[in-house]
Image (cartoon, rainbow, N blue to C red):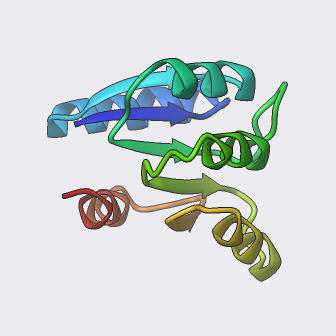
Amino acid sequence: MRILLAEDDRIIADGLGRSLRQTGYAVDWAANGIDADNALAAGTYDLVILDLGLPKLSGLDVLKRLRSRKSNVPVLILTALDGTSDRVKGLDLGADDYMAKPFELPQLEARLRALTP
């Protein structure tokens, strides 16, 4: 399974990417919203892990653009924004799941399994 990890924090991206690769996932990393949007427009992914606080283009804008292209790829928002209104907005814009940082890796992995066949 191929995952796009859109995360601007290099430490989180490195650790999470390494853990997911050890579990058997292929992981591509985008450090900003423009790179994430370009990767999603050009490539095929089975799942997207999307931070909302991306530089250059917000995670919500990446999500809007993805859904405007009629893509049904599952999107898990993984962000420090954990208010109810943030969650509702992300889900209403087309995210399939929403997790707040900090997170437990086993729970994230379980949610990834639930989002993919």
The one of 85 and 61 positioned closer to us in this rendering: 61
Give the side of residue 105 with respect to residue 102, left or right.
Answer: left
Nearer the observer, 91 or 103: 91
The location of residue 65, given as percent across then percent down, is: 71, 40
Q: Residue at x 24, y 60 (%)?
A: 113
Question: Where's residue 15, x and y in %?
Answer: 41, 33
Classify residue 49 as left or right of residue 68. left
Q: Quadrant of the N terminus?
A: top left
Q: Is residue 69 left or right of residue 4?
A: right
Instruction: State whether residue 14 is above or below residue 84.
Output: above
Closer to the camera, 106 or 85? 85
Look at 81% across and 78% down and name the residue there. 85
Q: Position of residue 63 (x, y in %)?
A: 67, 47
Residue 114 at x, y percent in the picture = 27, 67
Residue name at image x 70 percent, y 57 percent: 80
Up-down relation of residue 12 to residue 63 (above or below): above
Q: Is residue 96 left or right of residue 65?
A: left
> Which residue is more in the foreground, 8 or 75?
75
Residue ID at (28%, 38%): 20
